[in-house]
Image (cartoon, helix red, strand yellow):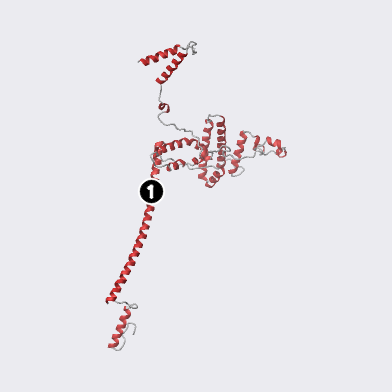
């Protein structure tokens, strides 16, 4: 209670020392200034709030994060990165950080990944045009062919406005994929025109960003619309003519990836669960492959050892059999056979001898008549 009364008295004294117009009274002494400062400190302590309330309930992450790594232009970059994370106690936290980085990079990658504009700060994928070249709308003038260099310089690309330079870029990209000189409605021509528009506007956004920190959302929104329109035209061209599609993206240096539908809800928890399931399946397959390889090695080793043992036992058995036969020969129970036994020959000779002793002629045969 005493502290409250003291605070109220200090606040009252502080309010009296100021006039209604906000100027400080000249009668304010050094002692009163010190007391006033103490009262303000007490007031700030009274209404002090925790820093946790300022940050909110969830962690903040930058949804407009600038991408500086060209490897992130791969649509499967973050999924591959998630598979390489170590499986330790911080695995879930690392997945959360990777998800926030993925979500924060989607906008910048959507604007630049298809045209490989990450870390591109000079040309932005636009073709190089000679500065001495006559601008497109003055190329057909025969007078300029015999004009002096000072006059040609006025009508050259070097003196062109931003609009005329943009037209030069468009003509250069269109001519690289145009089917013929009168082609003005083909999908290839349309894709080249949209590509030049995207890259020119991206260059303009970069120039504006160097002059002011305010983002030109009116221009980035238009870039999004043109990117979607080009993606649609590329899909149609790919369905109609695969050869023309490959030629177009190679000439314009466009990174085209077939968009795939996510197999999970686009939330941090669902993405982390999906990556964890994929990681578990991959680790399971790796472990099964390792076990299978180890099993094959063990089977081969067992076969080799078994064959070696079998060969050793057969040699020992042969030695024992020879030793037993030698003993039987010594004891007279067996004898060594000389030559090869022919049972059919012996029987026929025996029959011939018997017939010759009894009948004095050889035995009849089935072949004789």
Q: Is residue 355 above or below residue 205?
A: below
Return the residue nearer the eye: 146 or 354: 354
Q: The N terminus lies in which quarter of the figure?
A: top left
Q: Please state the total of marks drawn on the protein image.
A: 1
Is the C terminus in the top left, top right, bottom left or bottom right quadrant? bottom left
Residue at image position (52%, 45%) is 240
Please tell me how crowded label 1 is: few (under 14), some (14-19), or many (20+) other residues with Cα within 10 Å.
Answer: few
Check the image and report above or below for 349 versus 201. below
Where residue 208 sits, quadrant-wise, is: top right
Q: Mark 1 points at which residue?
A: 287
Tell me: 190 left or right of 326: right
Residue extending furthest bottom?
Answer: 360
Position of 278 with respect to 167 (left or right) is: left
Q: Which of 49 and 64 is in front in this view?
A: 49
Asked where in the image residue 160 lies, by quadrant, the reply is top right
Is 123 above or below relative to 23? below
Assign a secondary structure to mark 1: helix
Is 361 positioned to the left or the right of 55 in the image? left
Give the image location of residue 146, x and y in percent: 72, 39
Left or right placement of residue 252 versus residue 55 in this view: right
Q: Looking at this rendering, what residue extends furthest in the front direction? A: 31
- Between residues 219 and 69, which one lies in front from this camera angle? 69
């Amino acid at each position: 209670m005493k502290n409250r009364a003291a605070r109220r008295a200090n606040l009252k004294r502080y309010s009296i020392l100021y006039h209604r117009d906000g100027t400080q009274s000249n009668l304010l002494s050094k002692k009163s200034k010190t007391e006033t400062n103490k009262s303000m400190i007490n007031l700030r302590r009274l209404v002090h709030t925790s820093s946790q309330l300022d940050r909110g309930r969830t962690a903040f992450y930058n949804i407009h994060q600038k991408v500086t790594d060209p490897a992130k232009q791969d649509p499967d970059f973050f999924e591959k990165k998630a598979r390489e994370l170590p499986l330790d106690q911080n695995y879930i936290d690392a997945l959360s950080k990777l998800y926030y980085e993925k979500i924060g990079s989607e906008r910048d990658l959507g604007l630049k990944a298809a045209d490989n504009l990450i870390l591109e700060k000079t040309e932005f994928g636009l073709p190089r045009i000679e500065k001495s070249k006559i601008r497109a709308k003055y190329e057909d003038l025969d007078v300029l062919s015999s004009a002096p260099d000072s006059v040609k310089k006025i009508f050259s690309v070097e003196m062109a406005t931003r609009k005329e330079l943009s037209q030069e870029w468009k003509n250069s990209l269109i001519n690289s994929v145009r089917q013929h000189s009168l082609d003005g409605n083909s999908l290839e021509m349309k894709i080249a025109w949209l590509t030049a528009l995207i890259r020119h506007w991206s260059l303009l956004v970069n120039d504006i960003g160097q002059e002011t920190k305010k983002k030109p959302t009116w221009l980035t929104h238009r870039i999004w619309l043109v990117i979607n329109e080009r993606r649609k035209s590329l899909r149609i061209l790919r369905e109609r003519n695969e050869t023309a599609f490959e030629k177009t993206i190679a000439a314009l240096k466009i990174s085209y990836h077939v968009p795939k539908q996510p197999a999970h809800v686009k939330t941090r928890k669902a993405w982390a669960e999906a990556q964890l399931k994929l990681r578990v399946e991959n680790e399971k397959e790796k472990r099964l492959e390792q076990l299978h390889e180890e099993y094959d090695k063990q089977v081969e080793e067992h076969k080799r050892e078994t064959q070696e043992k079998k060969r050793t036992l057969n040699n020992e058995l042969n030695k024992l059999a020879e030793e037993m036969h030698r003993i039987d020969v010594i004891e007279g129970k067996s004898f060594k056979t000389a030559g090869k036994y022919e049972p059919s020959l012996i029987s026929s000779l025996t029959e011939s001898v018997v017939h010759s002793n009894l009948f004095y002629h050889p035995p009849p045969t089935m072949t004789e008549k």
